[in-house]
Image (spheres, rainbow, N blue to C red):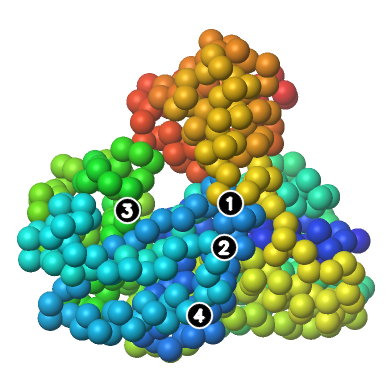
Amino acid sequence: MLDIFVVGGGINGASVARDAVGRGYTVALAEMNDLASGTSSAATKLIHGGLRYLEHYEFRLVHEALAEREVLWASAPHIIWPLRFVLPHHKGLRPAAVLRAGLALYDYMGGRRLLPPTKTLDLTKDEAGKPLKPGYKLAFEYSDCWVNDARFVVLNARDAADRGATIHVRTKVVSARRGDGGWTIELDGEAGKQTVRARMLVNAAGPWVDAVINQSLGKNGGRNVRLVQGSHIVTKKLYEHDRCYFFQNSDGRIFFAIPYEEDFTLIGTTDRDYHGDPKDVAITEEETAYLLNAANEYFAQGVTQDDIVWSYSGVRPLYDDGASAAQEATRDYVLKVEGDAKSGAVINVFGGKLTTSRRLAESVLEKIEEVLGKKGPAWTAKGTLPGGDFGPKSFDAELRKLAMDYPGMNAGLLRRLLRLYGTRARTVLGEAKSEADLGPHFGADLYGAEVDYLVANEWARTAQDVLWRRTKRGLKVSAGDAARLEDYLAARDESRA
């Protein structure tokens, strides 16, 4: 019998599985689709304190999130790195003194050591002012971090598996029944129908957490989650410098413009209640217009529909605290335990975000220890994710080492692989001397060796998995390349059958 069975392969589920197996519990996880195929790959992709949460007095959440920035950066410096955000003062919205005070608190609360502090900018002289309309003269520049969100999930799952956890992808939990001091869990997925036993369940199904309670667990638990839709557009690059913008909108909401995948700009997000099936969520014309109009309030060169190269949308599974507006609903997480060691306990996880996922997992483990007893100590604050075994400021040094080991490889390819796989980029490249040794070419700089690595080590099954969740090469490859990749993956499946 397993100690813990985790339902859900987003960031919360993967983080819990990793922490638990690292403490010595036996763990399995099931995700009904691909890892990070829901909310966890539809974020604004930031490790941040949530500056705007200060307005809603969520001081505990902001403090915890700010403290996590440097912890997570140190754990995965290949997929997490610092960014500088430019917050222009918009006359008629929040006063400059309020912005300055909020950022001073932001700097103070987070235990910042490596990230640089806030400073004031004169947009009439600073490069950050050039893309903006001439009316913007004053801005504040502060620090937060970027994260490759889908890879953050996959690397947590990979580390959990390396430590002994079993990860089931494309595997649905059909039912979970209490009895004989635990749970009998029926699965249906890649390996066919299976039955497993576990002493404890962790329901980390994100937008589907209520569905698991009501359907798989056979309970009528009511409505605990408020689904809030957040959509983003990706445009052609709107400016040349490497800083991000944090913009205020006239309706009180905020949005970001962030350099993305070298050649693009990411703009988002929206905040609106969502009442449909989470699997059907998609950006609406209204949201697209909202983001374009908001961007055009600030950027001197107009942003149009023709500039959009991609868009994506997800639903945040926020705990339903009864807030009147979607943007006011709490972003904090809530954990609810039901049952005990004799009957079989379940922890239902509501809310959460990328930034606080590691701390959420520690909070879940505290509750697991109360039911199952304590095993190993907490460890993830000092642990590194796969490929992240180098210093937070050492990426450029690691890139130089990789270039010395592979002198015949394109510099851009090496940089991309180091950003995705860290020190495990060497495993991807193997004995190759040049791109010609990396197997079939699927457009951009994606080759068979990388695809094979993703299938063997990161649970990739389809072209969608590879192009959009593992690599983001989908932004640059053609439809024909994507079709050839799908054929390649199908042939691999047939050869293993």
Mark-to-mark CA distance, 2 and 4: 13 Å
Residue 50 in the figure: left or right of residue 33 = left
Q: Which amino acid, mark 3?
A: Arg
- The residue pinned by badge 1 equals 392
Q: Residue at x 29, y 63 (%)?
A: 86
| N-term-proximal mark, 2 vs 4 | 2
- The residue pinned by badge 4 equals 109
| N-term-proximal mark, 3 vs 4 | 4
Image position of 101 with respect to 195: above or below: below
Q: Nearer the viewer, residue 238 or 115?
A: 115
Mark-to-mark CA distance, 1 and 3: 19 Å
Mark-to-mark CA distance, 1 and 4: 21 Å
Q: Which amino acid, mark 1?
A: Pro
x, y percent for residue 376: 87, 67
x, y percent for residue 305: 16, 47
Q: Which amino acid, mark 4?
A: Met
Check residue 93 in the rendering and tell me which mark sits there, or answer none: none
| N-term-proximal mark, 2 vs 1 | 2
- The residue pinned by badge 3 equals 243
Give the SS element for disc 2. Answer: helix
* Callout 1–callout 4 Cβ contact below 8 Å: no
